[in-house]
Image (cartoon, rainbow, N blue to C red):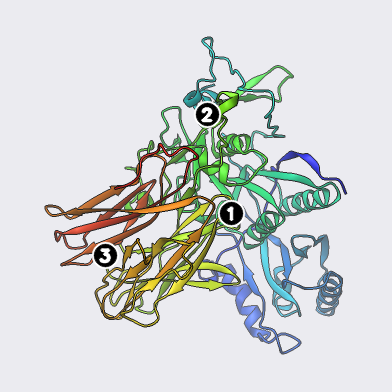
Amino acid sequence: MRRTSAWLGWTLCLCASLAVCAQDYTEDDEMILELIREDGTEPETGAEPAAEFLRCNKAAWRMPGQYLVMLRQGTHDSQVQRTIRRLQAKAARRGYLVEILQTYSGALHGFLVKMSSDVLHLAVKLPHVHYIEEDSSIFAQSAPWNLQRLLQPHGFISENGTYKPPSKSEVAKIRASFSRQCILFPASISLGLEYIRATLQAHPVEAVVVLLPFVGGFSRSLNAACRDMVANGAVVIAAAGNYRDDACLFSPASEPEVITVGAVNSADQLMSQGAGGTNFGRCVDLFAPGDDIVSASSDCSTCFTSRSGTSQAAAHAAGIQTPNTKKKTRQNKATNSINFLSLSETHRLTTPNLVAWLMILILPHTHTQHPYGELLCRSVWSERSGVASTDKAISRCRQGEEMMGCSSYAPDGVRVGETISVSNGRMECVAYNGQAGKGVFAVARCCVIGGLRCQVHPSPEPGKDAQCVDPQHHLTGCTSRSTAELLTDSRPHHGHRNHCAVKDGVTSHAVCCHAPSLECNLLENVSTDKDQVEVSCPSGWTLTDCSAISQSSAVLGPVAKGNSCHVRSATGATRAAGIAVCCRVRPSEQHATTPH
């Protein structure tokens, strides 16, 4: 089938089923769980565990009596109907009726059912059932400086304030429909995603942008459906939410494969709405205009109104996104312009300080520069680990990204380091909590550029250096894990032997990467009179790894902020050192600054 050389923008204003852990249950929830326990927990086949029962973490959003029954991954479509018939038979024997509202056989395999909560203890033990989510509502996050903010860095605003397109060759269309308060149901979101999936299979396009301008409580099924869309080539952009809370508590904002967008005002500061405001945290990828946005009104064909919210911000990000890959959205942003002082220390660290703007380079025809010639990297924070000495945290890159660095961070400095493991062909950055530590974060440095390929090489044994084997590969990052209570970080070295130097009892992983014309260098800064140090990559270079060294004390961990490496000692000791690995794709004309 001929592929259409265009791109497609989809907007869904629908609903999702939502889920949380059993420990959040009320007394009514405990009664349901007791019914399940009284009937026994072994499934009929004796080979599968009982399915999980999940409920929304927002009690007011729940819809008792309506449930999404999701089957295990890889289950054949025919099992959906068999499971339905088995549930109907079991319920009928006990005097209950069940009404099947919808079946799903695309991104999700399962069905939406209306039934008494008394039947749940039967449903969770059916063969092939993975989990059951109680239905609940989701909401659109909506409540002409916006175009000016997106275009101003490149002078595309005329004297009278109107928008002047830089060219006629690149036009993005967004199909958007916002009601004053969108409150629908999970069947709608599932059907909407299945419709998009089926349409794309019947009429393939080169690139797809799916806009999800709504949030609900954390939902495993909604996140899975979004993940499936990304796996099938779509770019999914979601609103972060307007609850002035951690975006990781909501869906689809919490799905790592989704580009989650928070909202800022005309001063590039966090949007505020009375007691609410934009969500934040590690699940947010960037911010965009979302306060007092002029929009069309349904009152008449020429009416307009003003709206605010992360729905508006997500729509702006979707408009910026062009029919290529996720990497351009990451390039289209200004850094370190937002004041995060109102956030907690953890959220100040993990929330990206990035504001989207439209990047279109208009150069003389004889000197056109491709916009993807720059290495683009971001820091991906894990959730905080538990406090046991055996607890760990894991951070992963998105599909299409390569991990060029991995580090760990402990708010109290008690950590034993990090390693890189490979699972299903993808690298994982794994951080380890220390003895009596209060938890640790894993921080992956995830990057994209054409032709980038990375490998990881471990130390042959503790105390031995890890090094790059292939001379065509560049050392872009080092990890360290210590058997002692106090971590001594490994030290990257370039030159004739790209390696990570370690001390006794320390193991390391060398991250070694190759891309056409890639080059890397080290920058180091040592502070002798204070416990903090910063080292930054120069213009044109990109930070791929941030390492911390302290001679007399543990460090909290290196923190990459934009293109800078920040290091702080845990106890205020001096002699903290920061080491940055800076990489770039060598320009055709060697005129850029070289780190030294």
Is residue 129 shown left or right of residue 286?
right
In this view, the residue farthest toward the top is: 160
Q: Pick the residue in front: 585 or 413.
A: 585
Element under label 3? loop
Q: Tell me the residue that label 3 is attached to.
A: 412
In x, y percent, where is residue 165?
62, 21
Q: Residues within 10 Å of mark 1 (few under 14, many from 20)?
A: few
Q: Tell me what residue is drawn at x 60 percent, y 58 percent.
A: 399
Q: Tell me what residue is drawn at x 13 percent, y 54 percent.
A: 528
Res. 239 visible in picture: no
Image: 549 above or below 369: below
Q: Nearer the viewer, mark 3 or mark 2?
A: 2
Q: Earlier in the sequence, mark 1 or mark 3?
A: 3
Q: Earlier in the sequence, mark 2 or mark 1?
A: 2
Q: Nearer the viewer, mark 1 or mark 3?
A: 1
Q: Earlier in the sequence, mark 3 or mark 2?
A: 2
Q: Nearer the viewer, mark 2 or mark 1?
A: 1
Disc 2 marks a residue whose amino acid type is Leu
Whether the residues at callouts 1 and 3 have beta carbons within 8 Å, the answer is: no
Q: CA distance from mark 1 to mark 3?
A: 39 Å
Q: Tell me the residue that label 2 is attached to.
A: 150
Disc 1 marks a residue whose amino acid type is Gly
Q: Tell me the residue that label 1 is attached to.
A: 451
Disc 3 marks a residue whose amino acid type is Asp
